[in-house]
Every structure is written in structure tokens, then in C-alpha cells.
Image (cartoon, rainbow, N blue to C red):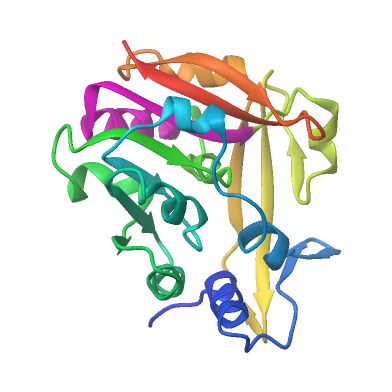
Amino acid sequence: MTGSDPYGHAIHDHHRGKRERPLLERSGDETREHPIERFYFTGSSGDEWTESVLDGPLLDIGAGTGRHALYFQDRFETVAIDVSERLVETMRERGVEDARHVDMFALRETFGRDRFCSAVSYGTQVGLAGSMDGLRRFLADLAFVTTPEARTVLDAYDPNHKGAIDLLGYRADPTPGLAYRLYWFEYDGDVSEPLLFRLFSPDRFREAAIGTGWRVTEIRREPENGHHYRAVLTKR
């Protein structure tokens, strides 16, 4: 495996029972331990609401340890992708049947038109689009690889919610409905490149979807973390 990937390395070590040190998140002088077990190896992977939205073939974007892919692959064809080679290996070791090393921002170059009936991405990776234009391009590419009746579920952080300011690496923006997060990972002496996430409010998400073939049809917020929301997008 090539390149620095402390995030994937730590999770892969945890999966194999070899992790002896914490995976750290850093931003400036602030440091937090990333809760690997709670985020990726504990709890249910499916719920009735998500199941009612998704259908196969399904594209699981930024699939991580494959929690959702493992759940859905028993119901319909599921393709799980991640940019981390170590996480792809982790998924395969955990039983994900179709795990691939694919950049979520290279969908059009990787898959054919109308390949999937639905898509899901949990983990707020869509913020790595970096800008409104970047989000539009991602949504247009996702529209290319999904059928005309497709639906997708994406999650994000709402900078308009008061809870967002407590996110590690939060950076305010004077533009309404937008903000940033800037942080990086460290594990066993390995440090990642800084990760710059753009935070979009639901209204900004709706604006970005215009002209991409998608429209936002539902917003669902986490009961205990209102700044975290899931957006259902449906083809026009």
C-alpha cells in the first residue's frame, strides 16, 4: 500500500486487534481521540427509514469498514467504494462482497451511465467537495451513474445550527449557510494531509442541486445532534 493513510491504518489495525495507540484528530492546538469502535464497529447498520429510500444496485460511497454494505448486500447488489486501500482491505476481510478502491470524485470515470438505482454516503465526506461548484460537479457525476428514478442519501453538517461551532476544526464563513472544517489525523507517528471540508446548510444543498438532475426532497436531523442531518435527493 502506498501513501500516508493514518486514518485507514488505525482502523485496519483495530479490526485486526493490533491497534495499541489512539487515532488522533488535530486542528491547531486542539487534539481529540477518534472513537473508532463506536463509529465503525458498534451498533446497527440499517434502519427502516434508510431502507425505504434505497434500492439495488446500490453504491455505498466512502464505505469505510463496510457496516452499511454488509447490511444491504444481503438485500440487493451493493458496491462499496473507498479511497483508502486499507479500508477496502478491511471491508473485504469483514465480508463485503464487492469492495473497490475508488475515489468518490471520480464516479463518471469509473462507472457506466445508469449503473446504480440508489446511492448512500454516510460520514459527511461530501464536504470534501470543497465548494458549491465542487458539490454541483459531484452531484452531476452521481446523476450520471444512477438511473432516472434513482434516490440517494447524503449526510452533512449544518453550519447554521448552533452545535456546529463545537466541531473540531470549525471555521466560520461570512457567507450565509456555509462554513469550513480543517483538521488532520495522526496515528503511530504518521500524519495525514490537512482535510478541508465545506459545510453546507440544507438550503445551500438545495441550491447546489439545481441543474444537476437532483432535488432535495427530505431533510432528517439527528435527534441529539441537530447540526448533523441527512438529505434525500431524488431525480427530477
Q: Is residue 30 above or below residue 114?
A: below
The residue shown at (50%, 77%) is 4
227 on left or right of 81: right
Query: Is residue 221 visible in this depiction of the protein?
Result: yes
**Identity of the residue drawn at 36% across and 54% down:** 80
Between 235 and 106, the one lying in front of the other is: 235
Q: Position of residue 63 (x, y in %)?
A: 45, 54
**Which contiguous range is marked in magenta?**
133-156
Q: Residue 164's quadrant in the figure?
A: top right
Describe residue 60's horizontal placement relative to residue 217 as left or right.
Answer: left
Q: Nearer the viewer, residue 104 or 131?
A: 104
> Position of 137 compared to 173: left or right?
left
Can residue 62 be seen at all in this image of the molecule? no
Residue lying furthest front: 74
Up the image or down, 161 lies above or below 11; here it is above
**Which corner quadrant holds the N terminus?**
bottom left
Q: Position of residue 161 (x, y in %)?
A: 79, 25
- Image spot of residue 109 (x, y percent): 19, 47
Residue depicted at 73% across the width and 64% down the height: 34
Q: Quadrant of residue 92?
A: bottom left
Q: Nearer the viewer, residue 70 or 165?
A: 70
Give me the residue at 52% from left, 46% from top: 125
Label count reads 0
The correct choice, above or below, for 83 with respect to 204 in the image is: below
Q: In the rendered view of the protein, which quadrant contains the C terminus?
A: top left
Magenta stretch contains residue 51:
no
Q: Which quadrant would residue 218 be assigned to in this image?
A: top right
Q: Position of residue 29 (x, y in %)?
A: 86, 64
